Amino acid sequence: MTTDKLVTLESDKWKFRCSNNRIDYSNEPFTNSDQNDKENVNYSLYVNNDKGKLSVPFIYYDIPMVMAGTEIIFQPTLRCESLYPERTIKLAIGTLQQGLKKTLISESFLLKEDWKTFKLIHERVTSPSAIRIGVYWYDSSPINLILSGNKTTLLKRDLV
């Protein structure tokens, strides 16, 4: 039997490895249908690496503990602030164990000006560990990459 749990991705828990970032909040709270309460997830992250020194900037979010036998489904909703032809992003899911970071799965996508939801699935966590989800890009453009907080989801599916 499988059990699904939607993880609320709180705005203040995102980490940034890029030269510029900001969080914009909407005035309307978002209702989480699983919990029937109001969550502070109605936000957008604006990031770029203008004049940055990192060759592969990224944003990431750490989930403290995921049990063995869990499937991770990361579905970020992203767009470019304005047309930036051929902007490539990479989504990744990895583990954090004893200070070591290990990428479990990653996939590259082409990002355009319209909102698009992407999907990355790691089929099964083999041992209990912290999980890191991330979005990478490969340029130093001043044009923002935007992540929609209320449309980006992380689902933990217990398969055992």
Image: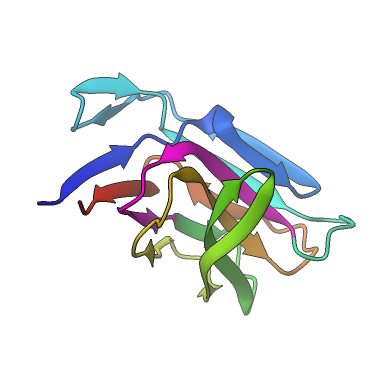
Count the marks: how many? Answer: 0
Q: Is residue 32 above or below residue 139?
A: above
Residue 68 among magenta residues: yes
Position of residue 115 measured from the top left corner of the image (x, y, whole percent): 43, 60
Q: Is residue 35 above or below residue 159?
A: above
Position of residue 128 measured from the top left corner of the image (x, y, whole percent): 43, 45
In the rendered image, the residue lying farthest to the bottom is 86
* Residue 39 visible, this orientation: yes
Q: Is residue 112 left or right of residue 127?
A: right
Q: Which residue is drawn at the image coordinates 37% and 64% (left, top)?
A: 121
**Colour mode?**
rainbow
Q: Which residue range is magenta in the image? A: 57-76
Q: Which residue is drawn at the image coordinates 54% and 57% (left, top)?
A: 94
Q: Quadrant of residue 30?
A: top left
Q: Which residue is drawn at the image coordinates 68% and 51% (left, top)?
A: 100
Q: Which residue is drawn at the image coordinates 40% and 65% (left, top)?
A: 118
Residue 64 among magenta residues: yes
Q: Is residue 80 left or right of residue 57?
A: left
* Residue 81 visible, this orientation: no
Q: Nearer the viewer, residue 55 or 151?
A: 55
